[in-house]
Amino acid sequence: MPTRVCCCCSALRPRYKRLVDNIFPEDPKDGLVKADMEKLTFYAVSAPEKLDRIGSYLAERLSRDVVRHRTGYVLIAMEALDQLLMACHSQSIKPFVESFLHMVAKLLESGEPKLQVLGTNSFVKFANIEEDTPSYHRRYDFFVSRFSAMCHSYHSDPEIRTEIRIAGIRGIQGVVRKTVNDELRATIWEPQHMDKIVPSLLFNMQKIEEADSRIGPPPSPSAADKEENPAVLAENCFRELLGRASFGNMNNAVRPVFAHLDHHKLWDPNEFAVHCFKIIMYSIQAQYSHHVIQEILGHLDACKKDSPRVRAGIIQVLLEAVAIAAKGSIGPTVLEVFNTLLKHLRFSVELEANDLQAGSTGNANLDTSSKDSDEKIVQNAVIQTIGFFGSNLPDYQRSEIMMFIMGKVPVFGTSTHTLDISQLGDLGTRRIQIMLLRSLLMVTSGYKAKTIVTALPGSFLDPLLSPSLMEDYELRQLVLEVMHNLMDRHDNRAKLRGIRIIPDVADLKIKREKICRQDTSFMKKNGQQLYRHIYLGCKEEDNVHKNYELLYTSLALITIELANEEVVIDLIRLAIALQDSAIINEDNLPMFHRCGIMALVAAYLNFVSQMIAVPAFCQHVSKVIEIRTMEAPYFLPEHIFRDKCMLPKSLEKHDKNLYFLTNKIAESLGGSGYSVERLSVPYVPQVTDEDRLSRRKSIVDTVSIQVDILPNSIPSDDVVSNTEEITFEALKKAIDTSGMEEQEKEKRRLVIEKFQKAPFEEIAAQCESKANLLHDRLAQILELTIR
């Protein structure tokens, strides 16, 4: 019962106190006295200067009732405060609000769940009121702390616990709505507040099941779910908070997410982490997406010493973020994303190599195999992210990324790669080569360049076709697949899948265009390099079925995309050279590989003969294939690449009708107007400097001379030729390169020794004399040109 005063004393009390006292009934169960409440409201509206006194008096009564546990009168006081707050909109409401917030704080501090919910409901009503002018001195630190604590309620009664948590989430939502719109009152975005608000929301969101199975933006919850389910309400509040974040506040809102996921070990499994970042990426403004990606990259760097599964979980989250950001604005973080991912790829391969090395020396424990598989999960996640990100970039950016990744691939004998492989060893280097080429394969998927020069510039093609990337069958497969992605500009590769004898190529409906001048120029400059790579790739001892398929597809794509008459002749020369190498077998290849080369040549000549549509050529190829079908089926791809195919003991005793003959091909093509002089010159690949530096068996150990004897290449009488006479001794000297290599090594040693020990003045004088000599020669040439 409230304290009653006598009539005389009551008449002497201020009017606002009498009006306030009158709204409280004798029995609190009767509720608020509505008639007296209307009088109090009219008085407050008529005399707004009294609002602060009304508020103070109500706060005084409410504090007393809270202490005395008079819950009924507390409910009446709060109802009166809510009605006054909704009815009065004037400058004088500011002091009243302070009293109101003081009373709400009293309720939240009480241990009564019912009073805490009551205080929260009143605060939410207040938060929805738009004030005419903001109050910059007002702070909500207490409410942020209190509502966040309520979000983590562990009350013994599940229903009361849920009710308190919902009240805490709604309170946080009210604080956000009240403060977030005013740029001058941005204290809510300070880290000390975000570190309480965001984890409180995430804590309640963790109950959402199968979050990662949602496709597209997370659906908006219904009104009923918002009121009853803390998880849905928290998610909605989190989405609203992120949607209101500005450029300067984005990082403060995102960083607590990482802390929460780390603390609760939610990266493995990472379903909840993926769900959180999907909400983040769909809720923030599109132009801020790159900020989130940068934060994920930074956290990935910070966690590089964590377990592989944690790192894989973070990378998969990055993939989801990139997938959403790629549809809008990615910003300036493109190279940063790739650089960070490649750095972690190298780090993962280094850890894997160290574990394998420890296992080989007998120091590994039982977890080595599991760590190895976990690191592969990290590597696959990196490659998948790189590929997805790269495939969503525009072509001009994708070409830069292709060059960027290619520049990271370790190529033996050169220092052009920018990836540190000093700690990897041979096994780790091979592994990083495979990983980077797989990444490159995904980036190049779907890339369409108008000219082949744009897709395969020299700075990209040279390291791609390096002998260092031919030391392993898997490396060669990846190199060829990357080339196919860049060459196949008309989507013909799927039609060529599988090495086989095609009865009618016209049924494939191959798409092709007339070869442009830029493509012709490319083949004149780089054709020999492509032929050489295919030739050497066919003669590797560790080739498997897939290698032959990809080599066949390479020949077919060059024919479709880049072949004029001259290139067709070169490709036929290459095919005949491969056939001869399989017959002679200077490389001591196993019989399966020799028959595989023969089958590859048969499949390609069958394809090219139908593509150029020369009847006599088609007839010769078809006849050889028909004879092989009857007498030597192991020379055809349909048989040799089948399990348990019978192999011959030797190829020397086979009838020449089983082989494609150069004279027959030359005769058939010559009759159709082709220039066939070059067909009489056997194809031999050229030797590069890298062959001498490479660790693999070099072709200089066999043949390294290519001679073209053409009528138009014979020098005229007035041209001075420095060509040496080709004799047996000259050929023997050219083939025996052991002495040449020793001379080159000695020459390099002397040069290095000179630069290390000779005085600087001597070296400078020698360089200056050479420069002067060159200058004099150029001047003479210029003078002769002018005359």
Image (cartoon, grey):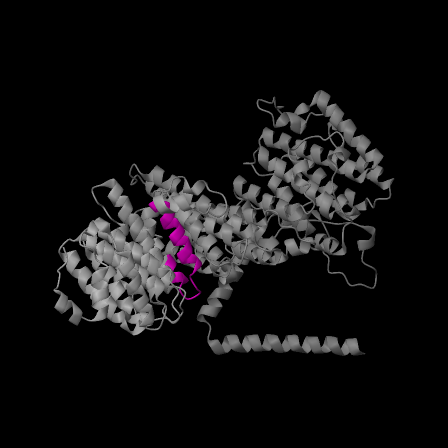
Q: How many marks?
A: 0
Magenta region's main secondary structure? helix
Looking at the image, which residue sits at the far front? 7
Look at the image and tell me whether residue 546 can be seen: yes
The one of 301 and 452 positioned closer to us in this rendering: 301
| Residue range corresponding to the magenta coloring | 229-254
- Classify residue 457 by image quadrant: bottom right
Residue 471, horizontal then vertical, whole percent: 52, 44
Residue that appears at 32% across and 63% down? 85
Horizontal relation, residue 591 to residue 611: left or right: left
Which residue does the image show at 59% across and 37% down from the upper left?
Answer: 547
Q: Residue at x 24, y 48 (%)?
A: 153
The C terminus: image quadrant: bottom right
| Placement of the N terminus among the 4 image quadrants | bottom left
Asked if 199 appears above or below 225 in the picture, the reply is below
Instruction: Find residue 289 and report its horizontal and vertical position in percent.
Output: 47, 58
Q: Position of residue 548 (x, y in %)?
A: 62, 36
Q: Residue at x 31, y 72 (%)?
A: 47
Is 252 a magenta residue? yes
Could one spot residue 108 in this view of the protein?
Answer: no
Q: Is residue 699 above or below residue 668?
A: below
Residue 512's spot in the image, x, y percent?
Answer: 75, 45
406 to the left or right of 621: left
Q: Nearer the viewer, residue 401 or 586?
A: 401
Q: Is residue 720 magenta?
A: no
Foreground residue, 437 or 310? 310
